[in-house]
Image (cartoon, helix red, strand yellow):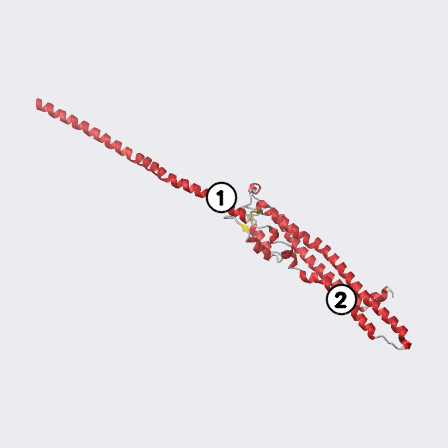
Amino acid sequence: MDLITIFTEPAIIIITFIFVIFIVTVLYNYIKTERNLKSVYSFLHSLNKNEISYRFNQLDEFMSNNSYTSVSWEDFKKALIFPDKFHAISQNSQQTKNYSPDIYLTVDASYFFNEESLIYSKINNKFIQAMPTLLTGLGPFFTFLKMAIAFTSVDFSISAVDGTLNELISGIQIAALCSVFAVGYSLLFMSIEKILYNQRCKKYCLLIQKEFVKLFDICTSEQFLLDLLKESKSHGLNNEKILKSLPEDMAKILTKSLGEITTPYLENILYSLNRLNEVMDKKSDNDVIDKLF
């Protein structure tokens, strides 16, 4: 049995054709995924932690419009702690160098942007993982089919026994080769698929996760609640001190205000009384002298 006979066998041609279709399908999906993830990585890489606050709207628009990240991005935004308001600073402002970010992430970015959300859900991963099984299954199928066909064509007459046995053995050999090709293609497919996946998809998934780590400082929920509790206690102590000192401060302020307001009027009244007494004294002295003379 020569190679031409083997590779022109319809069963082996069918197995080879299905193998090629599977490889082309995987390659098409992985190239498409790579192109989208690469664009996401390039955009994130162009951002800087110091400017993420006032470029967040731009980031939000890009991630929301990308079909590969839109769903994960909506969940990701819920895990962010935003400032009271964004800083309205232009992109070319000199203040960027000294600006510190005020948007914090409460959950690790890998929880939202991972292989499941960025790759598996976009490439029909379950079907791709089933392809090696399908290829392997074609082997026994065509093996038993060829053996059944070979046995049905056996002629047990004495005159045709030799030729029939030769055809039967040749058919069994082809049937066995169908399983060999199917298993071989299955192993080859798994190797090619893993190489393509790591080079074109997983690499950019990991790079995207690293970019998010660079852009957002992580503040866990426990740490956020602890800081909030400390801040509440600090405000409580300050308020308590203010309330305790409030009566004394009010008394001092009231005394000072009354002193500043009433003292001038009292001085004027005392001055007027003194002048009145002087006038009255002078008048009373003149009356006595007039009576004597």
Q: Residues within 10 Å of mark 2 (few under 14, many from 20)?
A: many
Q: Name the quarter where the C terminus is drawn.
A: top left
Disc 2 target residue:
138
Badge 1 amino acid: Lys
Q: Secondary structure at mark 1?
A: helix
Residue 207 in sight here: yes
Image quadrant of residue 190? bottom right
Image quadrant of residue 95? top right
Q: Residue 32 has which mark?
A: none
Image quadrant of residue 168? bottom right
In the visual, does 163 lie left or right of 18? right
Q: Residues within 10 Å of mark 1 (few under 14, many from 20)?
A: few
Residue drawn 21% across and 28% down?
274
Residue drawn 79% across and 69% down?
144
Badge 2 amino acid: Leu
In the visual, does 146 lie left or right of 88? right
Residue 96 percent across, percent down from the top left: 57, 43
Disc 1 target residue:
230
Residue drawn 25% across and 32% down?
268
Q: Nearer the viewer, residue 256 or 128?
A: 128
Residue 47 in sight here: no
